[in-house]
Image (cartoon, grey):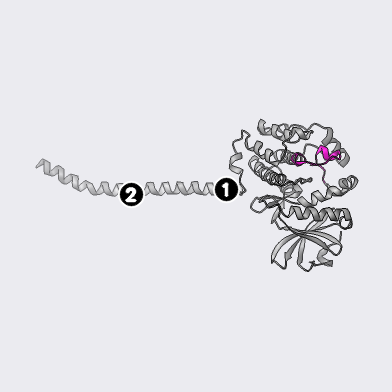
Amino acid sequence: MDDFTSSFPIINNRYQIHRTIASGGMAVIYLAQDLLLERKVALKVLRRDFSDNQEFQNSFRSEAKASAKLSHPNIVTTYDFGIDAERLYIVMEFVEGTDLKTFMVNEKVLNMKRSLYFLIQAGKGLGYAHRSGFVHCDVKPQNMLVSAIGVLKIADFGIARAMDTISRDERYDVVWGSPYYFSPEQAKGLPPSPATDIYSLGIIAYELFTGDLPFKAEDSLELARMHRESKPIPPKFKNRSLPDTLNDFILKSISKNPDDRFSDGNTFIKALNSLDLHFEKSYTSNKNPHKKDLLLQHNANSKQNTFNWSTILLSFLALILTGGLIPFWIYIIFSINR
């Protein structure tokens, strides 16, 4: 894929490219400066064979316009889109951090609180999109960005939907890229639904809580067969500390039949919040869990320090008062004796 950093440093006379953030089979993502609004943006330039596809161009424009209306803390905002030098591009909110997949690889196995924290944010973002009439179609951790303060944002809503116009043969090689997360109905070539996104989110939940995927194969066709036919190993078998309720929740999310899953992101979140877990309520807001832990620890230390100083001060005052009354009582005793 050609590199715009050397050939086309400014896109559409507005976006000044600084450096490459990521590169894949579908597109190259650059860090760029919006010269008009003077802000950093993520500029995603799509591959030329997508840009030359007129059907895809039409779908891309339609979906980009629609996705630009999605405004939610857990969804990457779409700012702009267009075509320059015969290449389609989309301008998105720049999120300083990394994608969830890289985060999981680097962390190896996430603790349960942090896993639940990410899962709740992803569910909220999808729930909002589903309420707005959107199905992502390509939910995977590579499309989830984690900011430096721990906020998760789902990316590529418009692009994923537009790519449904591409033929199925090409989808395996290019569009899906990593078919570990797609649903049985997608593997069968059936239309996606909100339950399709839930299946993919359930696969991510399985990976978050076990550090492993339920289905693995070298060949994408074999992966498709496994999604359609193979029964997953219960996540509790891979993580013995997993509560039974959470184990059942994940298995329901990745049911083969869409009707057996949670219908959309909203029912997914509602069911997740109703589980009998000891830690879910503390991590239902879009706050950094580590920052919250540190704040609680700081407050506890402050209270402890306040208590210690107060005790010392009161003891000192009592000592002064007691010492000051000793001469008085001696005087009283001698007076009585006389």
Query: Residue at 15% across / 42% down in the picture?
Result: 333
Cβ atoms under marks 2 and 1 closer than 8 Å: no
Q: Does the stretch in magenta take in 69?
A: no
Judging from the image, what secondary structure is the residue with disc 2 in?
Answer: helix
The range drawn in magenta is 178-198
Tell me: 307 left or right of 118: left
Q: Is residue 162 visible?
A: yes
Query: Residue at 88% across / 40% down in the picture?
Result: 221
Query: Residue at 84% across / 39% down in the picture?
Result: 190
What is the three-letter code of the residue carrying label 2?
Phe
* x, y percent for residue 198: 74, 40
What is the three-letter code of the residue carrying label 1?
Lys
Please tell me how crowded label 1 is: few (under 14), some (14-19), or many (20+) other residues with Cα within 10 Å.
Answer: few
Camera-side residue of 309 and 283: 283
Locate the C terminus by quadrant.
top left
Q: Is residue 24 visible?
A: no
Judging from the image, what secondary structure is the residue with disc 1 in?
Answer: helix
* x, y percent for residue 202: 73, 39
Q: Residue furthest right?
A: 169
Number of the front mark, 2 or 1: 1
Alpha-carbon distance for marks 2 and 1? 36 Å
Tell me: 213 left or right of 321: right
Q: Quadrant of residue 89?
A: bottom right
Choose the circle earlier in sequence order: 2 or 1. 1
Q: Is residue 218 above or below residue 80?
A: above
Please tell me how crowded label 2 is: few (under 14), some (14-19), or many (20+) other residues with Cα within 10 Å.
Answer: few
Q: Which residue is mark 1?
A: 292
Q: Which residue is mark 2?
A: 316
